[in-house]
Image (tube, rainbow, N blue to C red):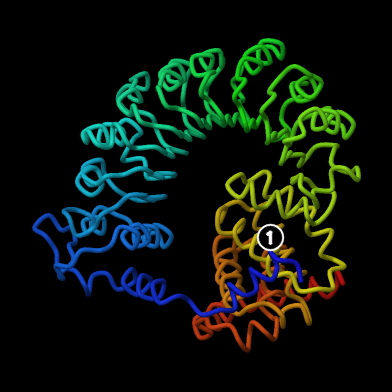
Amino acid sequence: MPEDQAGTAMEEASPYSLLDICLNFLTTHLEKFCSARQDGTLCLQEPGVFPQEVADRLLQTMAFHGLLNDGTVGIFRGNQMRLKRACIRKAKISAVAFRKAFCHHKLVELDATGVNADITITDIISGLGSNKWIQQNLQCLVLNSLTLSLEDPYERCFSRLSGLRALSITNVLFYNEDLAEVASLPRLESLDISNTSITDITALLACKDRLKSLTMHHLKCLKMTTTQILDVVRELKHLNHLDISDDKQFTSDIALRLLEQKDILPNLVSLDVSGRKHVTDKAVEAFIQQRPSMQFVGLLATDAGYSEFLTGEGHLKVSGEANETQIAEALKRYSERAFFVREALFHLFSLTHVMEKTKPEILKLVVTGMRNHPMNLPVQLAASACVFNLTKQDLAAGMPVRLLADVTHLLLKAMEHFPNHQQLQKNCLLSLCSDRILQDVPFNRQVIALELKMRQKRILEICLGSFLIS
């Protein structure tokens, strides 16, 4: 059994750690351990202090379960919790609650991806900037899928965080002037500006002597010519990672032109051109052979990745669609990008038709894609079809129960989100009818039975349709 497969199987088959059990229990029964302040926010009743690592994990667990709001984040006020790496993804909090709960901590990392629209990037940076320690020591900031400012979209604010080394600001109305301000940060080494409103990347020349990682996936507003883009990239001599991938929407020859350059990016170890046109195995191989330190190349949704040199099974990792190894690498690297997840799952479905061995490590990657994109129908449709192929007949018997429990939960959520999509409902029902799931996986069968009874006519039509198709 390969090492990654064995590792996944052991992880999923082993019992939850005592810390995980305690944090999950505390998270789901938080009000039992708290009292309410006059403003309605919660505070822990016990006076003890949580270790920093435990406090970070508690916050992450609450974020994972979607339990962060103005009331619950109150437990992070004061000194009972000592946060260092804070994850508040998809929190539903106000700017005031954010400042009171998090801005007095000595944070070195903050992931605020997808927090609700009541709080803006300007609010977050203003709050962080009120703490002099954070100004100088915050190293990593993730602000994906947020609003820059509700009052003044042209307000500049990033210069307050002089210690910042890594910034991710994808899916944001982030402009050339913002890029110029960020590029002037004295310690910046890693930048992700994917799917922003930038039209010109010339400002990156201001950080050419320190930038090591640059991600520019789907820069749809870029107005520079290929030659102009390459002239800027050529100056970024310290880059280790470059991502110029796209969602197959443009016909630009930027990828091919880059691959043809011999005097560019000498220190590169990772290049992603997934979704780009005109990419060939020959061009990719020539580029890599000139840079023997290369460790990864992204080729999903291109015409490349089919040569023996690019299998992805050796030292050089490859995301692509030519084989299972490439597809698994794509699902790992692109779990936040719905288009690439769908592409990878589409090709995985073709492979799993003839799969004879249990693959828990692959199923876990499918689960991650389903969880990250619950409202994306193409992703859920492709994922549910892959789940059926990966768990049918004897294959389910070798899957860890914990993993199957996650699968069951996500299949039921997909049915709930898309009740009128016949193919999706059929995919989910066929998977849920697995003997292993019905017998061994813990879930509320009474609730499901009631829901199925309410929809029994529709289900009968779907099942009959599946028999007719088969």
What is the three-letter code of the residue carrying label 1? Answer: Ala
Tell me which corner region of the image, top left, top right, bottom left or bottom right, holds residue 358. Answer: bottom right
Residue at disc 1, secondary structure: helix
The location of residue 440, given as percent across then percent down, is 61, 87
Tell me which corner region of the image, top left, top right, bottom left or bottom right, holds residue 202. Answer: top right
Residue at image coords 34%, 35%: 120
The location of residue 51, given as percent across then percent down, is 28, 62
* Furthest-front residue in this view: 292
Tell me which corner region of the image, top left, top right, bottom left or bottom right, holds residue 293. Answer: top right
Left or right for 295, reference 455:
right
Q: Which residue is mark 1?
A: 383
Q: Quadrant of the C terminus?
A: bottom right
Looking at this view, is 267 or 133 the one in front?
Answer: 267
Left or right for 36, reference 166:
left
Left or right for 183, reference 453:
left
Q: Residues within 10 Å of mark 1 (few under 14, many from 20)?
A: many
Looking at this view, is 10 or 97 the one in front?
Answer: 10
| On screen, residue 337 above or below 377 | above
| On screen, residue 114 above or below 439 | above
Q: Quadrant of the N terminus?
A: bottom right
Looking at this view, is 275 or 191 the one in front?
Answer: 191
Task: Count the labels in the image.
Answer: 1
Residue at image coords 71%, 77%: 460
Residue at image coords 31%, 41%: 118
The location of residue 335, given as percent across then percent down, is 61, 50
The location of residue 301, given as percent across then percent down, is 77, 40
* Furthest-left residue in this view: 38
Looking at this view, is 349 or 230 the one in front?
Answer: 230
| On screen, residue 336 above or below 467 | above
